[in-house]
Image: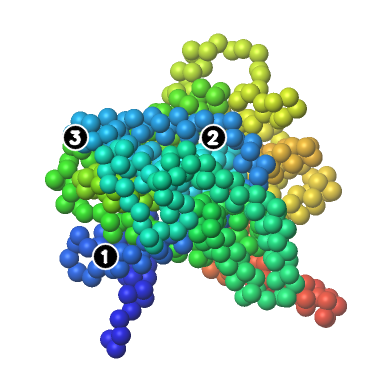
Amino acid sequence: MPHDTPLIATIVAGLGLAFVFGALANRFRIPPLVGYLIAGVLVGPNTPGFVADAGLANELAEIGVILLMFGVGLHFSLKDLLSVRAIAIPGAVVQIGFATALGAGLAWLLGWSMGAGLVFGLALSVASTVVLLRALQERRLIETERGRIAVGWLIVEDLAMVLALVLLPALAGVLGGQPQVDSNASGLLALPASYGIWGVVGITLAKVAAFVVVMLVVGRRLIPWILHYVAHTGSRELFRLAVLAIALGVAFGAAKLFGVSLALGAFFAGMIMSESELSHRAAEESLPLRDAFSVLFFVSVGMLFDPFSLMSNGLPILATLAIIVLGKSLAAFVIVVAFGYPIATALMISASLAQIGEFSFILAELGVGLGLLPEQGRDLILAGAILSIVLNPLMFLAIDWMKPWLEARAAKAAPPVEAKPIGPATAPGEVASVAPEREDGPPPKTKLTGHAILIGYGRVGSLVGAALKDAAMPFLVIEDADKTLAKLRADGIETVAGNAANADVFAAANPEGAKRLILAIPNAFEAGQVVLRARAANPGISVIARAHSDAEVEHLKGLGADTVIMGEREIARGIVEEVLGHKPEAAEPSAA
């Protein structure tokens, strides 16, 4: 080649191998992220053959973290975040303390110093942003009460780790390491130890508070105004560019000027943007890059792993994995149950937090650089991260298996009492943050018959629902977003809370007695699963679905949908009707 192109080589090798091994993993019904991790191991320095640039891979992965947290922020509001503070703050703090103590205990058994134990324990206490959010998104839990608790918990962990990163250099000498002053450091990490511990803590909290104030006062006005201005230009390219520039710019500025983590800065940018009417469009425009760069995150994690360490550090790795998967999960479960939340919520939070990731690597590198953590500790953290990420999908399968058994035991232990609100205590006049009914078990079956089942109540579903209501046709809605469910119930519309692809949720809608099934969700693959369930339960039910391409139309009709409406074709028919003054004949892919 005429010149060296490490960035291109890293992206091509990372995405190419991730696709190959992700597809293989999916073929064998293994989570694709396992394939992404294997791809990273193969292009890493610990295996023969091509070696990608680890530094570039880490930076590309960081972009994935930024975009992912930005996307989560788009579905959040400050009210949502504050609604779970009563469980997220104490829960995260106690869980961090418990996991740190377990890690320090293992470090003591391995003969390490107190400082090494502290760094090691902290690294094992914080969950990976990418893994947790991917798990919630796959199960469509981001907008549920459980999802909000998990994200709020994650934000508290993020803030705690920012504080740990700025305090460790100041405490290195006391903990048995070597104080480090990096002349190239920026943000909070540049604070000298001469400020004293409380001085560093004070400046840290002041800068974080300053960032929050700037975002709430300036960002709240400026970001929506920029979006609306660009939207009125009519350029989709400029709008997409504006969304990415805001997400990356706010994240980078937060890290450089205020010492806040990139992920936290991106989350706040998304949360402020969520107040704009264009937030849904912003989420759609950033989705492709979000997915691509989150894949590169898993590849970069795989690059760090030395598979031969499994043989040289077998028992310590198993002990480390036990702390991450069992110790943290047990602590989270006990905390959430102690606050009065249902067992299903406690299990979901436990599974979400049973892994470690990006902050753990940063802490490990800082600990080694300060002379606090031995290199064996970094190897154990990397091995624990890889294995816990691989096992995380199995944790969710395990909680599905454990949930009925635990709920049955809880029901026997506690005799029926008068119903009362559950959840943490609230201030006078404040609405308690209570888990939705669907978290306590399968939803009750509807008594409706001869009705329509409407799946999804977004921009399309809400229009369909309004028409059904005006026509006085009996129907119910299956939806999993808490805000939408609350609005539907306030309007007197019967609902089933949850994902329609779930057998228990769909059965609650009484498909056997239903006359029509209307799929208003945009995900054709998920819709296909629902069509199969509907046909199995009621072969005579009329199925109407939506699609975005001819391939999706063929997919859904092949699974048994009677009518599939493709948005672009309906728009074209409307335009032709206006021009010609009469309705054109229905195009074949859009009709039964």
Residue 26: give x, y in percent of width and height: 37, 56
| Label disc, if present, on residue 551 of the rendered structure | none
- Label 1 packing within 10 angstroms: few (<14), some (14-19), many (20+): many
Rendered image: mark on residue 110: 3
The front one of 31 and 581 is 31
Question: Which quarter shows the N terminus?
Answer: bottom left
The residue drawn where x is 36% and y is 57% is 182
Task: Describe residue 276's horizontal placement relative to residue 148 as left or right.
Answer: right
Residue 447, position as x, y percentages in the image: 69, 32
Per the image, the residue denoted by label 1 is 43
Chain-order first, disc 1 or disc 3: 1
Circle 1 sits in a helix, a strand or a loop, which is it? helix
Q: Is residue 404 visible?
A: no
Residue appearing at x 84%, y 48% in the figure: 470
* Dot 3 amino acid type: Leu
- Between the C-alphas of marks 1 and 3, the distance is 31 Å
- Residue at numbered disc 2: 88
Residue 150 position in % (x across, y down)? 52, 40
- Residue at 79 percent across and 50 percent down: it is 466
Task: Please report whichever mark, 1 or 2, sits nearer to the chain's N-terminal start.
Answer: 1
Q: Are marks 1 and 2 in contact (CB under 8 Å)?
A: no
